[in-house]
Amino acid sequence: MDTPAPAVSARTQRNWLKVGLIMGPAVALVALLVWATFTKGSAPQPGDAAPTFAADRLDGSGSLSLEDFEGKPLVINFWASWCLPCEEEAPLFDTMAKRYEGDLAFLGVNIKDAEGDAKKFEERFDVSYPSVRDEGRTIEDSYGLTGQPETFLIAADGTIHEHIPSAITDAAYLQGLLDDLVTTSGE
């Protein structure tokens, strides 16, 4: 003899509805984050052409583009004022920019910052090389950043020579990278 299935109470139905209303958006959010992670552009690799850009200078004196550095090796450092590793590497980058002046150029790209905070950062660390603001995050996206700081070494022919996806605080390491960039670009 078949026994009829027990009727689902209205209370049980309401509980399942609540679970669905909470879990549905949570599952959708996780799916969106996973999708965004895997569809974000990847960083250009050594030998790839460096992505072009143009952006306003942080000091307000016009704009700069990748083409402004054509024919010269370039160090592009992506930074933010609230980034502690960016603070740690800023003095070293300024020292190296002065040491290699004439052999290569340095460019800072400020990301995810209010203009005033970015200017205060440059003043605090007495940054001697130019920086641009990536207000729309287009430069960040074209270089496939995953965090900050990140540094790209661009050869004189406009190709990516090296990508360092973390802070550089070791002077000997940075000097080795820069010596290699200058030597390779001069060949």
Image (tube, rainbow, N blue to C red):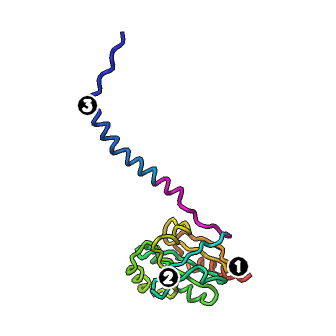
The circle drawn on residue 184 is 1
The residue tagged 2 is 131
- On the image, the x and y values in percent for residue 113 come to 41, 74
Helix or strand or loop: what does disc 2 sit on? strand
Going 55% across and 68% down the picture, which residue do you hit? 142
Looking at the rendered image, the disc whose residue lies closer to the viewer, 1 or 3, is 3
Going 65% across and 71% down the picture, which residue do you hit? 49
Q: CA distance from mark 1 to mark 3?
A: 75 Å
Helix or strand or loop: what does disc 1 sit on? helix
The residue tagged 3 is 10
Helix or strand or loop: what does disc 3 sit on? helix
Circle 2 Cα neighbour tier, 10 Å, few/some/many (<14 / 14–19 / ≥20): many
Q: CA distance from mark 3 to mark 2?
A: 63 Å
Q: Nearer the viewer, residue 71 or 86?
A: 71
Q: Residue furthest right?
A: 187
Displayed quadrant of residue 22: top left
Looking at the rendered structure, the kind of residue marked 3 is Ala
Please give left or right for residue 19 compared with residue 103 in the image. Answer: left
Looking at the rendered structure, the kind of residue marked 1 is Thr
Where, quadrant-wise, is the C terminus in this rendering? bottom right
Q: Are marks 1 and 2 in contact (CB under 8 Å)?
A: no
Sequence-wise first label, 1 or 3: 3
The number of numbered badges drawn on the structure is 3
Displayed quadrant of residue 18: top left
Above or below for 16 versus 139 = above
Please give left or right for residue 131 compared with residue 184 in the image. Answer: left
Asked whether residue 34 is drawn in magenta, I would say: yes
Going 61% across and 81% down the picture, which residue do you hit? 67
